[in-house]
Image (cartoon, helix red, strand yellow):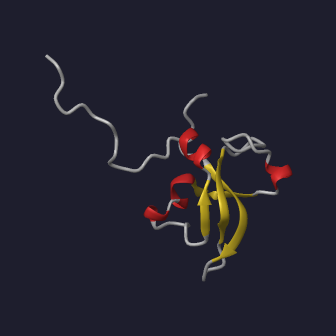
Amino acid sequence: MPTRGEPSVAASGEWRDEEGVRLPAGEAHAWWPGTNQTLCGLALSRSRLRRFHHVPWPDVFPESGGAADEVRRVCPRCRAAAGGRRPGRRWSRVSPRP
């Protein structure tokens, strides 16, 4: 699959912040706009997931401080499929062989 930037969010619930903006709540999944399923393979309509075009995937992680206030669980399969590893924890060889 070609690189398209960051996926958006689909979630089991929603809430509104002080400014009235819809934000994800409950269980969050990664989702490419224009498709009908999450990255882990759940059908959006059958799973009754709400789409959030305006919320990028990295914003649902608690460490991001973004739209994660009401997110209770981030799908581990979507996190792996989207490459959602923790920042700064990439693997690197400490002492490479010559």
Q: Position of residue 18 (x, y in %)?
A: 60, 83
Task: Name the residue rendered at 54%, 33% in the picture.
Answer: 3
- Residue at 34% x, 41% y is 90
Against 18, residue 6 (above or below) is: above
Task: From the top left corner, tell me how far across and down residue 97 is, in percent.
Answer: 17, 19
Q: Is residue 41 left or right of residue 83?
A: right
Q: Residue at x 54, y 41 (%)?
A: 80
In the rendered view of the protein, which quadrant contains the N terminus? Answer: top right
Name above or below for residue 67 compared with residue 79.
Answer: below
Outermost residue on the right side: it is: 46
Taking depth in this image into account, of 78 and 55 the one nearest to the observer is 78
Q: Position of residue 42 (x, y in %)?
A: 76, 44
Residue 7 horizontal side relative to residue 63, left or right = right
Which residue of the protein is positioned furthest toward the top in this rendering?
98
Residue 33, placed above or below residue 25: above
Q: Which is nearer the eye, 53 or 43?
A: 43
